[in-house]
Image (tube, grey):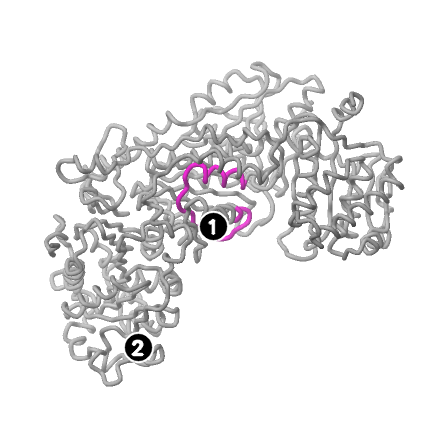
């Protein structure tokens, strides 16, 4: 029996007291333990940012890579070890700014990684600059007159790119979030969970209260149709007065990338021994140049 | 038979096939090179093409010789021109008595032709049509004509056509090409052979492979157990990913054409982090994008191999041409200081060797290994003995990789970045309960957790850098060619090997003795060996395909030896042996 304690790392988080990352961290551990997964069966991959420190605070295989580059690093891991559950943690700057290209391509490939985006609409680690998801008018050190960029809607981007699992959670709603993570880990292919995460230090607008007043669970909506792309595209546009959470879209009829790779038909390449080639193969390879 | 063989010994023949992009210059040229190789000759062929799909002027130059030699030269005996521009360009390269073949229907201006050039214009289009072929087969007609003129038995050309077009009896494309080749051969033989004194004679010889650096390096990688390769197309590095992908299903390799080079190297590093032999292949521009991730591999001690096939920069530069100008870049790419290994194979044999060796070095020293090739080595087709692709020498060394049994027996928590005397920490592939660890691009402690403590920083930096000292034991020292004492000592690295070796042969004919220090393992730099060898030299001349003499600068930095005489070329074209001779003062 796997418990949350099995994922306990000796490292104490350095997040600010009250940080939304704590809720996400707890939900991840709860979900993994709930699925009966052992720490060695899981690989947590992150970029750089406050969110990306999560693997350091978790006892599991972890790789904290470069700003924006968690997804391609995770893709490489998944492609040689599809037996591992690979979970990416990115922030909104890291995942939706620096690394947005990779998200689009991961979605269209349907590579089997879970992408948990800690979206606090601000840069935390670099101390308070506006991010790709900051509202227009957000005043920050790099937008002192108020941001004039329009914010990115990550759910629409993911849906447009062909993602087969698109969800949103709220770091304070731990039960819902851990259920979303469990569903994402079990999903066939790429799964995005955009997580609303208050930043108690640098974002004084999008607070716990601000989100709590606005979030609603899509599953409770009349006409909930998470296999209908058009429904999901409409619902994903809601922002402002009402912010949808839950699974907005999920289809299981698209094969994951890794299940279609020829070399993986015989199992994970990373579990096969490496040995010199046998003489018949050598002969065949040379024959092409005679 | 004896007379035939004696004459065969004398064969030293250069043919050039020129035309527009889309006329099959390179594929037909490569086919003819294979015919010559199968005729028992030594072959060296260089392609010269522009960065475009149609039009322009491309050519393929093949030198074939009965005895061993090292590279192309500037003497052309027979030119096959498929376009007017090709005729204008190649007529000027011909030696006296040399000849140019082109379609009679082509309007060629002969006023600028050198004396002694023979005009072998022939009705190529008509011959193709009469044989039932179409205008795409003009190239086949041209090589058929070449065999008729130079006296090469047509069966060598026919054999390659059969292999290239499926080899099935009755295959229409193959049959038509064969008919075209025969008709052109017969016409050329009947009209021109008696007037042409440069002949190609088949030789009795062991079968040699006809191969270029890219496939040799790719085969090396496959032989070395490469399990993952990602890349993004960029000339001239793309063929490595293409070739490994072609073998992927059969050899159990996962390959990925990524969305960009940053993704490509990050995927390879991810695969390395997951305990597999992983690589990426690119050229300088792609490597520029990979630079930040190179440091990630250095910091997190992940083995990864980067095949960097150089082309002339800066920026887009000359996309389809050659240069050796990324040496300093490879040595210093990425912020901060971390151990890396840089190899620069110069020959087919070395390209294959470093293709597999790079994975051993990467895993033993848990660091990035950059293999620097260049367009000249990557694309020049040449004959080599089959044993140059020395599969028998391939060994797989995975370094201090922990086995499941070792992990089972391990007491206490696993320290992935354990401080050790060698700097090498035992590493565990993921999947074992006791081998769980995290690693990060931040400075970290022995467990892999973020740690900014000054003493830890010092110890961790020193641990990582010690690996570079340990790696010296595995570095192959520079090879010395030629006599121990010589009038001139050449110094070169990578593919400049070829023209230097050929220049040495030319100097020998002039009675000038030369030897040659060829540096292949570039970093960690073999300072002691280079110092020892150069201290004895009378006159040192460095030869490099770049503007700033990068290896010369590195030698000065690492040994204090200043090389005054540098022969440098940066026009994007490979160095020829004649270019080296022209650069030598007083010879």
Residue B218 in magenta stretch: yes
Is B198 displayed left or right of B497 in the figure?
right
Instruction: Say if B266 sits above or below B44 in the image.
Output: below
> Which residue occupies 38% across, 34% down?
B360
Q: Mark 2 falls within which chain? A: A
Is B275 displayed left or right of B289 in the figure?
left
| Rendered image quadrant of residue B299 | top left
Is B299 displayed left or right of B22 in the figure?
left
Q: Can you identify the residue that label 2 sits on? A: A236
Q: Mark 1 falls within which chain? A: B
> Which residue occupies 55% across, 36% down?
A286
Instruction: Say if B560 sits above or below B34 in the image.
Output: above
Q: Nearer the viewer, mark 2 or mark 1?
A: 2
Percent x, y for residue B564? 56, 27
Instruction: Say if B262 sits above or below B150 in the image.
Output: below
Percent x, y for residue B232? 47, 53
- Which of the image's four quarters has the C terminus of chain A? top right
Helix, strand or loop at label 1? It is helix
Foreground: A241 or B488?
Answer: A241
Q: Can you identify the residue that label 1 sits on? A: B286
Instruction: Say if A18 sits above or below B165 in the image.
Output: below
């Amino acid at each position: 029996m796997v418990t949350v304690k099995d994922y306990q790392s000796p490292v104490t988080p350095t997040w600010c007291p009250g940080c939304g990352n704590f809720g996400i961290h707890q939900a991840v551990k709860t979900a993994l333990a709930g699925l009966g997964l052992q720490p060695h069966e899981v690989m947590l991959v992150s970029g750089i940012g406050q969110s990306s420190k999560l693997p350091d605070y978790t006892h599991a295989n972890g790789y904290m890579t470069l700003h924006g580059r968690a997804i391609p690093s995770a893709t490489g891991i998944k492609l040689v070890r599809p037996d591992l559950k690979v979970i990416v943690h990115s922030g909104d700057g890291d995942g939706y700014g620096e690394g947005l290209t990779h998200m689009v391509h991961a979605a269209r490939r349907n590579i089997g990684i879970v992408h948990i985006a800690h979206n606090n609409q601000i840069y935390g680690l670099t101390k308070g600059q506006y991010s790709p998801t900051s509202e227009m008018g957000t005043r920050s050190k790099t937008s002192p007159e108020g941001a004039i960029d329009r914010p990115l809607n990550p759910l629409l981007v993911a849906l447009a790119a062909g993602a087969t699992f698109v969800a949103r959670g709220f770091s304070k709603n731990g039960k819902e979030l851990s259920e979303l993570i469990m569903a994402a880990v079990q999903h066939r292919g790429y799964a995005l969970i955009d997580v609303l995460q208050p930043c108690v230090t640098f974002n004084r607008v999008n607070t716990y209260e601000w989100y709590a007043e606005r979030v609603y669970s899509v599953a409770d909506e009349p006409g909930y149709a998470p296999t209908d792309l058009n429904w999901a595209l409409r619902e994903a546009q809601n922002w402002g007065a009402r912010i949808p959470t839950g699974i907005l879209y999920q289809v299981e009829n698209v094969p994951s990338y890794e299940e279609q790779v020829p070399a993986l038909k015989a199992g994970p390449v990373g579990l096969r021994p490496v040995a010199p080639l046998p003489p018949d193969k050598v002969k065949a390879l040379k024959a092409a140049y005679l | 038979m004896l007379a035939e063989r004696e004459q065969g010994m004398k064969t030293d023949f250069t043919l050039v096939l020129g035309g527009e992009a889309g006329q099959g210059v390179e594929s037909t040229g490569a086919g003819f090179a294979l015919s010559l190789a199968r005729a028992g000759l030594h072959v060296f062929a260089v392609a010269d093409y522009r960065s475009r799909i149609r039009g322009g002027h491309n050519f393929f130059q093949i030198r074939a010789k009965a005895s061993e030699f090292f590279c192309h030269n500037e003497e052309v005996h027979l030119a096959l021109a498929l376009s007017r521009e090709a005729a204008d360009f190649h007529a000027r390269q011909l030696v006296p008595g040399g000849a140019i073949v082109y379609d009679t229907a082509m309007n060629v201006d002969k006023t600028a032709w050198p004396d002694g050039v023979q005009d072998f214009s022939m009705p190529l289009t008509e011959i193709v049509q009469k044989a039932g072929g179409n205008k795409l087969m003009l190239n086949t007609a041209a090589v058929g004509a070449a065999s008729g003129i130079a006296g090469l038995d047509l069966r060598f050309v026919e054999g390659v056509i059969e292999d290239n077009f499926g080899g099935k009896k009755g295959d229409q494309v193959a049959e038509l090409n064969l008919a075209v080749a025969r008709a052109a051969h017969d016409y050329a033989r009947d009209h021109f052979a008696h007037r042409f004194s440069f002949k190609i004679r088949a030789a009795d010889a062991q079968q040699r492979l006809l191969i270029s650096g890219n496939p040799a390096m790719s085969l090396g990688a496959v032989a070395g157990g490469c399990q993952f390769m990602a890349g993004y197309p960029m000339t001239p590095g793309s063929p490595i990913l293409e070739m490994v992908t072609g073998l992927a299903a059969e050899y159990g390799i996962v390959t990925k054409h990524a969305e960009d080079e940053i993704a490509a190297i990050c995927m390879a590093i991810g695969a390395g982090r997951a305990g597999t032999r992983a690589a990426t292949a690119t050229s300088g521009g792609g490597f520029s994008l990979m630079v930040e991730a190179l440091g990630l591999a250095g910091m997190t001690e992940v083995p990864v191999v980067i095949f960097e096939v150089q082309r002339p920069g800066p920026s887009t530069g000359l996309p389809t041409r050659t240069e050796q100008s990324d040496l300093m870049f490879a040595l210093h790419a990425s912020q901060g200081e971390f151990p890396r290994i840089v190899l620069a194979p110069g020959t087919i044999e070395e390209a294959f060797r470093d293709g597999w060796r790079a994975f051993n070095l990467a895993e033993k020293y848990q660091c990035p290994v950059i293999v620097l090739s260049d367009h000249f080595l990557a694309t020049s087709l040449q004959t080599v003995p089959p044993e140059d692709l020395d599969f028998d020498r391939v060994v797989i060394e995975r370094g201090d990789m922990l086995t499941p049994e070792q992990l089972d027996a391990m007491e206490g928590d696993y320290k992935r970045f354990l401080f050790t005397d060698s700097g090498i920490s035992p590493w565990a592939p993921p999947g074992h309960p006791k081998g769980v660890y995290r690693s990060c691009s931040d400075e970290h402690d022995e467990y892999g957790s973020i740690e900014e403590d000054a003493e830890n920083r010092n110890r961790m930096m020193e641990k990582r850098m010690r690996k570079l000292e340990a790696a010296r034991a595995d570095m192959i020292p520079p090879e010395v060619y030629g006599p121990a004492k010589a009038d001139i000592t050449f110094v070169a690295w990578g593919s400049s090997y070829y023209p230097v070796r050929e220049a040495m042969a030319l100097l020998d004919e002039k009675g000038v003795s030369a030897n040659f220090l060829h540096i292949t393992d570039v970093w960690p730099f073999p300072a002691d060996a280079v110092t020892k060898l150069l201290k004895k030299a009378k006159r040192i001349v460095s030869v490099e395909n770049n503007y700033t003499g990068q290896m010369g600068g590195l030698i000065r930095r690492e040994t204090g030896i200043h090389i005054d005489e540098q022969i440098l070329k940066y026009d994007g074209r490979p160095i020829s042996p004649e270019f080296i001779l022209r650069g030598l003062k007083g010879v």
